[in-house]
Image (cartoon, grey):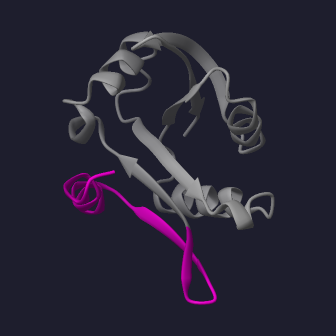
Amino acid sequence: MSRARIEAALNDMPVIVARRDGRVVGYLLAGSRESKAGVPIMQAMLRAYPGSPDAYMYGPICVAESKRGQGLAAAMFAALRARIPDREAITFIRSDNAVSLRVHRKLGMRPVAEFTHEGAVLTVLTHPG
C-alpha cells in the first residue's frame, strides 16, 4: 500500500498494529465508506453487498508469516471490534483463498455475496454489529 493510503487510513478509522519483541508482526486497517468511495474494487464489492448504512470496510489484515496460526488475527480483530462496537464490518477475499476464508469464518464473519473484479472472483464477508 502507498504511504498516502496508509496515512489516510490512520486519519479515518482505527488501525491496529501488533508488535512482538519490538517488531511489527501484524496490522489491520479499517475504513469508512467515504474513504473508500473512489476505489473501484470497493465500489464493486458494495454493489454486490451494500451492507448496513453505518457499515465500515474491514481490511486488509496482514500477519507476519512466522506468526501465523498463533491467534494474532483474532486478537487484532477483537481489538478493532472493541473500538468500533455495534457496527457491521464488510470485507472481501479472493474466492480461491481457502486459508483466508477459513480464518475469517473463525472470526465470526460469514459470506454474503460474490463479485468479479478484473477477472478475479471475490467473496464478500460480513460481521454483524
Q: Where's residue 14, x and y in %?
A: 39, 61
Q: Which residue is drawn at 66% across and 57% down?
A: 73
Percent position of residue 7, x then y:
23, 61
- Is 4 in the magenta? yes
- Which contiguous range is marked in magenta? 1-25
Residue beneath the point at 36% across and 12% down: 47
Asked if residue 118 lies in the magenta stretch, the reply is: no
Closest to the observer, 42 or 80:
42
Quarter of the image for residue 23 reads: bottom right
Q: In this view, does 123 lie above or below 6?
A: above
Q: Is residue 79 left or right of 14 when viewed as pictured?
A: right
- Identify whether 126 is placed above or below 50: below
Tally of numbered tags: 0
Quarter of the image where one finds residue 51:
top left
Q: Which of 127 and 28 is in front in this view?
A: 28
Q: Which residue is drawn at 58% across and 35% down?
A: 128
At x 63% / y 59%, what residue is drawn? Answer: 78
Q: In the rendered view, does 129 fall on the left or right side of 40?
A: right
State which quarter of the image contains the C terminus.
Answer: top right
